[in-house]
Amino acid sequence: MTELSTPKSDICPDGAAGQSHFFRRFKAQSQAERGRSILALPGLLFLTVFFVVPLIGIIVVSFGETKDFEILYNFNVKNYQKVLEPLYFDVIVRTLKIAILVATVSLLIGFPVAYYLARKVKRWRMLLLILIIAPLWTSYLVRTFAWVQILGANGLINYILNSLGIVDEPVQWLLYSEFAVIIALVHINMPFMILPLYAVLERIDVRIFEAAYDLGASPSRVIRTITIPLAMPGIIIGWLFVFIPSIGAFVTPELVGGTEGLMIGSVIAQQFGTTFQYPFGSALSVTLIILILAVTGVMMKLMSRRSA
Amino acid sequence: MISKGEMSRRALIVWVSLIIIFLYAPVAVVALGSLNKTEVIRFPITEYSLSWYVDLFNNRQIGDSVIISLIVGTLTSVISTIIGVPLAVGINKHGSKTRQALSAICAIPMMTPTLLLGIALLNLFVALSYPLSLSVIVLGHVVMTIPFVVLVVGARYVNMDRSVEEASWDLGAGKFQTFVRVVIPSLRPAIFSAFLITFTLSFDEPVISFFLSGTETTLPVLLWSMLRFGISPEINALATITLIVSLFIAIVAQIATNKQANR
Amino acid sequence: MKKQIRVLTHAGVSRRQLMKMTSAALVGSVAPNLMSSAAYASDVKGELNYMTYETFGRDVFVDNALEVLGFEIKPTVAANADEMVAKLRAGAKGQFDFITPVHTHVKVMAKLGLIQPVDSSKLTNFNQVYPEFQNMEAWNPGGECYGMPGIWGANAIAFNREMTGEIDSIDALFDPKFKGKIGMHNAYWSSLIVAAFKLGIEKPFAMDEAELQECKKLLIAQKPLVRTYWSNIAEVRSALGSGELALAFTFLSVVAPLRKAGLDIGWVWPKEGAVGWTDGFSIIDGTDKAEQALEYLDYAIGPDYGQVLAEKTRYATVSSEAVERLDPSFVKEIGMDVSQLDKLTFLDIPDNEVRYQEIWNEVRNA
């Protein structure tokens, strides 16, 4: 797979002097090819020590059992069986549903913004980029509380609707509902959709568009057949950047969800209190990771099929 | 009669403005609340006061935690980017099977609940007898944020025109030189996005920070612990100041970019 | 022969710049570690590392300790007792000297060897603590003293008198009249207990499966009436303040700020029962600062600390002398009435806690 041996000539960046062009190119190419693994190596090493090892620990614990505040490593699948029980299965399905919804809505809303930033703005780009991420520098706790003020029965939106005479009674479902959970989660994760999309869209060479227009393609055709396929990696990544945090979210849903919207993140968090259900909590998390990987796999398949 | 192109351009601007309003609405409400005389906010606000700002200024606990969060956030984004960018490029040079497998492994930290990451890492450091401190928090945050760097940079690198890289090798540049002088500059928007995202994630992360902290407290940890007894209104003042500071940073950054472009 | 490459790119980062950045980052990540390993070891005399809630770590208490006792308190704040236990248990025990647990977790921490016994005969302020708090079972698991309570409170019903009128019974939380305006606490140790009160169950914290199922049925039936399951104080205070909720089962601390904002908020311990809790002080097992920690504990249950506590945080102190120093109307406002303590059902961790949690999840999921 990856080559770990690195011949000394790799370290020396010099192109060899006095050799024929062909030989130099061949050497450079194999230098670069052998050099593939070097670039990734420090990072992979870092992750192995500081993530893979703890992850293995988590997986091992998930096959254990809690007894008397201790974890017994007696290797059983009871926890995973428990995950499939109706209560938890239900919660996981609901969580998936909400997360997919949030990510897709974010994509639809955010794509135009990323497009605008990448293609239409040159001068004020830096300003806009920072403006877009800056709201996230105020704690999401504070911002979620603010959503309560905005969506509440006596909050801003109802105040406006009332003043304009659109409603006589305050609209109740704006807050403490799944609707509120989705709005809040979209709000919190939106910049993580816009930034990656922007980073990829910015790359697309302007000349491709010019050529397309020259050939008589309409703007919508161009967007459909050129922009979106080329942007596909960014679309996938942006979608995942919203989907994944949304799956694990629980603080925001608890704050604005009212009696609805119990998500799996809450359940996982509960397992690490005085009940010491670390094994079950770990099993839930591992299940979650597998689910996310599955969804990611599906997305990647889509990407490789549709990208240019 | 405006052209179709002009119309769609205007529509786009309207849309972007709406999204910006959407992003800032809660922050605006918070800013308004920070000027409210009493702790409890009721619309419409009748009595205004700057007392919370005064309280904030005198609050050492909050002040210290902000500084710590800034340090942690900056270190995290720098280190995460330095590790993540080569990692992203290195991974994406491989054939598709290897690339997907490695990308998946690099992405798993972001799929793991931070509670588990925090506890598992704490266990690791205790097992290594390594004392907890700010640098340990930074390590934890780097683990948490590397997936973001790898994925964003990777997505852009995948689209990059490799012939430029090859041309550079042709001309005799070594692999490392090519990487630094050719690849990185063309990845700049992605690296910049990754840097911003990483800083933001670290700056607002309460769980890993709690478990890996020595005796220092970051801002989000402090905020979370305030939930038990009630968040003091000074926090609204803090949020407003953060807003003003970030606007300031945005403007300064823009001016700096313009200056560089005009050179 | 090295050729410089001029390619169509923006200004790139030169290798030298990269090297500079890397070394700076490395130094930067090592330096804080160096700084704090001196600090956290707490080997400076008179320094106490303190795991607590944000409230007790506020500047006023830190300054107070320095001024009066000469101790430098270094608070590490936690969001809740579960997190505290998780962190200590995962190995961070050696880092702390002193902790403020909620009483329910004392027996757990004692069992896990996270805290050490306290010799209460050495506490000079012991006798001026209200007798009800002197020998609480929760703080003396297995008959041995593992700490002392410092503040206490009752969780009961707060209501907006304008919207609801007078209330004296737990039935109000189940009254269809208040549909869509009721707030319940998102915690099994609150809401299941409320159900238990309504059903007249004798030992809410020792319910068996049948009783739990009864509670579950009741709570699911109540769901359409409930506006939200609130998760933290700031939220429920804000909701009551904005009129989103007319009444809620909640903590006393929401009342004072709401009244200050001009709302007519009533507070009542329903005749069926109310939930009591105490936060207090314990000494971490294995600390080399046990003596100083004991000194601080002694001070913290005393009148000076108690007075500052009550005035700054509006919570009820266990120190009778502190209460005597306070303005009677203030005492009334805060609700520090020890005469009714026997009416309180104090929090406890049930043996079948896992079931309690699961039942509550089932209610939320319904």
Image (cartoon, grey):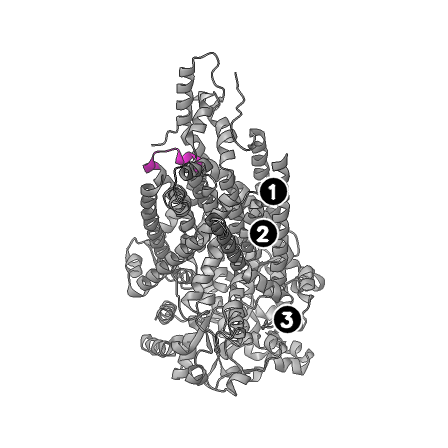
The dominant secondary structure in magenta is: helix
Question: x, y (%) of residue B10?
Answer: 51, 52
* CA distance separating discs 1 and 2: 16 Å
- Report if residue C111 is visible in the image: no
Residue bearing the label numbered 3: C309
Would you say residue B89 sits in the magenta stretch?
Answer: yes
Rendered residue at 58%/29% (across/down): C16
Asked where in the image residue B78 lies, by quadrant, the reply is: top right
What's the residue type where badge 2 is placed? Ser
Q: Which element is circle 3 on?
A: helix
Q: Nearer the viewer, residue A214 or A170?
A: A214
Residue bearing the label numbered 1: C31
* CA distance separating discs 3 and 2: 28 Å
Location of residue C328 with respect to B224 vertically, above or below: below
The residue segment tinted magenta is B88-98
Question: Which is more N-terminal, label 3 or label 1?
Answer: 1
What's the residue type where badge 3 is placed? Leu
Residue bearing the label numbered 2: B69
Location of residue B96 with respect to C160 vertically, above or below: above
